[in-house]
Amino acid sequence: MGAIIKKELRSYYSSPVAYIATIFFLVFSSTWFFYLQRFFAQGIASLRGYFGVMPLIYVILVPAITMRIWAEERKMGTAEVLRTLPYTEVQLVVGKYVAAMILLTATIVLTVIVPISVAPFGDFDHGKTAANYIGLLLLGSAAVGIGVFVSVLSRNQISAFILTALILLFFTLVSQIPASLDLSPRAAAIINYFSLDHHFQGFVTGVLDSRDVLFYLLVTALGLYGASRSLLFRKWR
Amino acid sequence: MIDVAHVHKSYGDIRAVRDVSFTVSPGAVTGLLGPNGAGKTTIMKVLTGYHFPSEGSVTVAGVDVVSDPLEAKRRIGYLPENAPLYPELTVGEYLDFIAEARGFAGARKRARIAETLERTGLSGEVSRRIDEISKGYRQRVGLAQAIIHEPDVLILDEPTAGLDPNQIVEIRSVIAELGRAKTVILSTHIMQEVEAVCGRVLIMNRGAIVAEGSTDDIAARLKGDDVYRVVLRTRSAPAAETIPGVRRADTISIEGDLTELRVALPRAPHSSEAIFDWSVARGHKVLLLERDRANLERVFRELTSGDGEGR
């Protein structure tokens, strides 16, 4: 599987996609935090505004990473070579998922500049910051899982991008329904359970809840399972 | 060794391939010849396990492609139509990926890559990006990818499509050389390709195999000769090459005093008379004299008129 991961990363970094996605991510999140959120004017030593917006940024960032992952192979015909190499469908899907996660992790790691640069200005809770990063990785994993699945089903990159973005947007914002409407607690809890953003809020406040961790891992597993089953199913058509 | 038994393949409502059976043995390149849309590519995809057959079985190098796809894939080298590659990688990076995926590492990997580059004439292109090299070189990279692990079975879908005449000659010589030791099947819609590299040919039309045989035999029929199946009762061995005007004569079988021949004569009305008269003059009793598979002619016309590519 190492060969696939290596090849995927080579492809990412020999096309502009990875660089554009990384720069977009860093510029947008920093602008949001320092300029729009007015971090320095607020006078509070909190990175909540910085991490809170990440799920929304993921709605664009993750599809940009995952759109090509299968759709491009299918369109270029390279899927035919890839899928006649001695790998199982699960190995192919997981290999590509791992490569996408490495790229996403590399992008996230670059953002530590922000917490480090504001650290001297106040008494930040570093445990909380660590929890935020764990949450970012888990949320990213779930989003990549969805993106991989959609990419398998798509004929080209653009439709993979749009569909993934719409799905992520929906499951990110769905927690706004119980927040703005007066629903029964039970209905609200059910809707919130399916929200990618709702599970992230725990990490933002520094709480590591195993239920949130489990949710993200479950979404990841379902996405990858769906992707490998779809690949296998296509052989029979 | 490839063994295909009663394979059907449908895509939705479209029946791409109907009841196809054949075997391919090592030692001679087999050509799968047919007009565009005949089902050649479907057969190629089914052979590699990229698609599974709707019915029937495919065994490659003794391995069933549906029940043990992983092992089958290890034994197969496959060049899909148009040699799809990753344009953003260099030739070296691409072959490095394929070699690692095929389980090579370290010095052995480097040796395999170097040997394959040498064999396909790509040594000078290692560090060039695939989107910068010519179509001919890309086709070679595709071929290199297919042979890097020295597979028992090579499956090549239109290996020379889109190449210029010099490139075609080079690729064909590589294929012919591979065919001496391996089981090789290639698809094409050009008769000359089959004549140049294949010892055996299968002809497909509308999803079915309509003829198979040695290339010489099929070529004779394609050239518009009348081909007859003849069964003679005779004590002496019939010297069929003495038939007046004969183009080709093959002895198919001899059982006791029965001899079966296949005889090709230039196309003419009642050309079978020459065989009959020759038999009578020689004292052979004609037990059977029939035209071979007249329904092939329509396919041959499609093949030979066609889009004229490569001629």
Image (cartoon, helix red, strand yellow):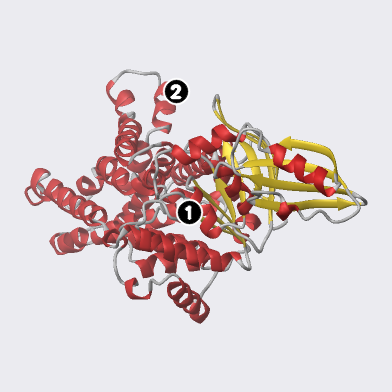
Q: Is residue B218 above or below residue A182?
A: below
The front one of A221 and A74 is A74
- The secondary structure type at the circle numbered 1 is helix
Side of A206 relative to B73 (left or right): left
Numbered label attached to residue A42: none
Give the number of the mark in front: 1 or 2: 1
Outermost residue on the left side: it is A41
Q: Is residue A84 visible?
A: no
Provide the residue designation for mark 2.
Answer: A186
Side of B126 relative to B7 (left or right): left
Provide the residue designation for mark 1.
Answer: A81
Side of B96 relative to A109 (left or right): right
Where in the figure is residue B4, as x and y percent of width and height?
Answer: 69, 45
Where in the figure is residue B264, as x and y percent of width and height?
Answer: 66, 46
What amino acid is labelled 2 in the image? Answer: Arg
Labels 1 and 2 positioned on one and the same chain = yes
The front one of B205 and B282 is B282
Of the 4 image quadrants, the one containing the C terminus of chain A is: top right
Where in the figure is residue B2, as x and y percent of width and height?
Answer: 67, 53
Side of A118 relative to A147 (left or right): left
Q: Residues within 10 Å of mark 2 (few under 14, many from 20)?
A: few
What amino acid is labelled 1 in the image? Answer: Val
- The secondary structure type at the circle numbered 2 is helix
Q: Is residue B235 visible?
A: yes
